[in-house]
Amino acid sequence: MDRLKCMEVFVQVVRAGSLSAGAAVCGMSSATATRHVQALEARLGQPLLRRSGRCQVPTALGERYFTECAEVLARIENADALGEVGPAGASMASAIARPVGQIRVSAPTTLGAHLLMPVFAEYLQTHPDVALDLALKDRAVDLEEEGIHAAFQAGGRPEPGLVAHTLRGVTHVACASAGYLARRGTPRQPADLAGHDCLGFRYDDLLGRWAFDPAGGSAGMPYMPGMPRTSGLSGTVVASRDARLTAHNPLAQLQAAVHGMGIALLPEYLLAPEVAAGRLVRVLETQAQLCEPMHLVHLAGRYVSSKLDDFVRFVVAKLGPDVCPAPMS
């Protein structure tokens, strides 16, 4: 059975949500469409679809296989369209190199929704044949297991087996509401935090602690047990007071700080609008600032598709360590 035809049928079935609907798109019976999908499953040795109510949905392997098949078919369409490229039009080389298909991208929820979304929007505007599937998760992801093409990682060192592209770091600053500081006083040094309510942050079921450079010349940061000390701290003074409120999401910390519940250590891109509006005040500015490392990673030892290579180059051009950040509003 023709493998490309099988791929086309499988892609249409996934897009339509059922074998019968996909078969109709391909102009064949449901039984014929089923045989095409079964031929792929026999070749791979694993199921690609599973039943969910009245629909057929892809398995974990099916989702990854769908992404690759869709790109292959799109490439073939592009190749067929080369005959339409006239001598006065775009060059054949540019038509071949045009990125096509879907890229699965992972990022921490708040980072992806706030700092990265403008970059994603610009990328899609300039790459009409590419789609982004965003997996925004506040936990570590397994790129191979979850079918992720590229992941944004903040803090720590990328794991072995990953190709890491260094991006501009994310600055964290301690802050509190004016009302809270009026009631409890303003800390002047990290040791003063022992007498304050510090809002806690939990990532991937690990409770972060606050660490500071005792010399006052480096950074304050949310520190996870076992995290490599990439910030260059030679020693730390960790706030010992237990957090009265702990959250998994920086947005929850932000709102808690705005409502006077304590002092939070937050990314500058979240903090700046609240400071400008007078709802929050920066504290410990000379000591509690961290340019937390950020990387864009993908699997090593694999073929890097042109779409992924182009996406990485675009992101590094916008967020690389040598690129000046846009002013915070």
Image: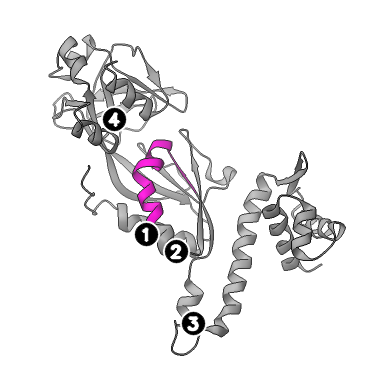
Q: What stretch is highlighted in magenta?
A: 105-122
Where is residue 279? Give x, y as percent: 22, 26
Depth check, mark 2 against mark 3: the one in front is 2
**Sequence-first disc among 3 and 1:** 3
Query: Do the residues under discs 1 and 2 have CB atoms within 8 angstroms?
Result: yes
Residue 234 in the image: above or below residue 117 = above
Where is residue 31? Give x, y as percent: 87, 57
Depth check, mark 4 against mark 2: the one in front is 2
Q: Distance between the residues labelled 4 and 1?
A: 27 Å
The residue tagged 4 is: 266
Q: Distance between the residues labelled 4 and 2?
A: 33 Å
Q: Foreground: 30 or 237? A: 30
Q: How far apart are marks 1 and 2 (CA)?
A: 11 Å
Q: Inspect the image, locate mark 4, and give the three-letter code of the amino acid beneath it.
A: Leu
The residue tagged 2 is: 127
The residue tagged 1 is: 314
Q: Inspect the image, locate mark 3, and give the three-letter code of the amino acid beneath it.
A: Met
Res 235 visible: no
> Which SS class for mark 2?
loop
For the point 85% across and 61% down, which residue is it? Answer: 29
Q: Quadrant of residue 215?
A: top left
Q: Tell me the colour scheme of the image.
A: one colour
**Sequence-first disc among 3 and 4:** 3
**Sequence-first disc among 1 and 2:** 2
